[in-house]
Image: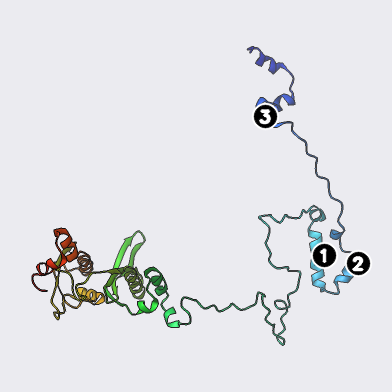
Amino acid sequence: MSACRPLRSFLQPFSRRALSTSSFLSHRGPVRDYPVRDTPPPNPATAPYTPADLADLRKHYSASQIASFLAGETSISRSDFESRVARPPSDPMGLGYLDDLSMYDPLLDFPDPANPPVYVPGHPLQPLPVMTDPFYGDDKEAARVPWMREVSRQTGFSEEELGRFRHRVLVSHRVVNMTHMGKISKIYSLAVAGNGNGLVGIGEGKATEHEDSHRMATYVAMRNLEPIPRYEGRTIFGDVEVKVGAVELGLYSRPPGFGVRCSQYVFEIARCLGIQDLSARATRSRNPMNVIKATMHALRSQKLPETIARGRGKKFVDVRKVYYNGMV
C-alpha cells in the first residue's frame, strides 16, 4: 500500500458516498429509503357533528353534556383520530377487559329493588359453594386445631389419637435479642408430648405471644415423637448417666411399685412416655432446658440386654440377672 494514497484522499472533493460506505458495513446490503406515510383519507366517523346529529343527541343527553362533547371536539385535533391504528391483541400495554362495557347486564346494571335478581348458575354473582373438607368431614371440633392436620400427615396418627396424647409446656420465659433496631423480645417455650406407651418428643418454640409460643412448641414436640425402649413397659433398661452442657444426670431403673421419684421435668417426661418406676439425680447445674435435653439423651442411650448379649456372645437369658444385679 502506497503511503501517499491517504494524502491524495484529502485532496479529492467531498463525497457523501465515500463517508457512508465502508468495508465492515458491506455485508448489510444497500440502505433502503422507506416512503413517508401518506395522510389517510378523511373518516366520516370522525367528522364534526352536523345539525342532524346534534338534534339526535338532544334526545338522549342534556344541554351541559352536549356542550362538553363540543368542547372535546374542538380541543382535540381531527388528524389525531384519523391517524390512529388499532392495537394488536398481543399489545402488552393494552387493557385486558373481561366484560363488554357496551352491553347492559340485567343483574349488575340498574338493579330493581322490587324485583330482586334471580340466581343463574354460572353468573359472577353466584354465591361461593360451601365445600366440606374430606379430611375433617363435619367434625368442627377437630377443625378448631388446624395444625393437627399437618401433624397427622407427618406422623401417621389420626387427629383423634393426637388429641388423646399428653402434652405439657415445661419451660416458658422471656428472651431478648439485641439488634441495631433495638431490643426484640419474644417468649421461649419448651414442651413435651407423648402417647403414654413408648413415644415421647420435645419441641421448642419462640413467638411474640405466650399462646403462639406454646402452640408452636407443642406442634414441634408432637412432630418429633420417637420410640423409647422400656423394660416390662414400666422402667428403663439399667442405669444411665449422661452429661449435657454443665448438667450431669443419672437415670436409674427401679423395681415395681417404686414410683417416679425425680424432678418435675423428668417426672413429666416419664408420664408422657409411660414409665411408672424411675429415679433420677441431677448434679452440678440444674438448668431446666439442659435437664430436659439430658433426660431425652439418657433415654436414647439405654443399653439393651440383646445388644450386650450379642457383644458377649451369650444368650439373652444368661445376661438378664447379671445385667440387673439380681433384681429380676
Using a 10 Å C-alpha cutoff, classify the residue at mark 3 as few (fewer than 14 neighbours), some (14 to 19) or many (20 or more): few
Q: Which residue matches tag 3?
A: 25
Element class at badge 1 = helix
Quadrant, the C terminus: bottom left
Can residue 51 be seen here? The reply is yes
Query: x, y percentage for residue 261?
Result: 15, 77
Q: Which residue matches tag 1?
A: 70
Query: x, y percentage for residue 142?
Result: 42, 80
Q: Which residue matches tag 2?
A: 51
Are the residues at dot 1 and dot 2 in contact (C-beta closer than 8 Å)? no
Per the model, the C-alpha gap separating discs 1 and 2 is: 12 Å
Q: Earlier in the sequence, mark 3 or mark 2?
A: 3
Which label number is shown at residue 141?
none
Query: x, y percentage for residue 127?
Result: 61, 79
User: Looking at the image, which residue is at 36% across and 79% down?
Assistant: 163
Per the model, the C-alpha gap separating discs 3 and 1 is: 55 Å
Q: Give the residue type that dot 2 points to.
A: Pro
Element class at badge 2 = helix
Q: 228 and 19: which one is in front?
A: 228
Per the model, the C-alpha gap separating discs 3 and 2 is: 61 Å
Q: Quadrant of residue 290?
A: bottom left
User: Looking at the image, which residue is at 80% across and 42% down?
Assistant: 36
Q: Is residue 305 left or right of residue 2?
A: left
Q: Earlier in the sequence, mark 3 or mark 1?
A: 3
User: Looking at the image, which residue is at 73% across and 78% down?
Assistant: 106
Using a 10 Å C-alpha cutoff, classify the residue at mark 1 as few (fewer than 14 neighbours), some (14 to 19) or many (20 or more): few
Q: Give the residue type that dot 3 points to.
A: Leu
User: Looking at the image, which residue is at 21% across and 70% down?
Assistant: 288
Q: Is residue 288 left or right of residue 22?
A: left
Are the residues at dot 3 and dot 1 in contact (C-beta closer than 8 Å)? no
Quadrant, the N terminus: top right
Element class at badge 3 = helix
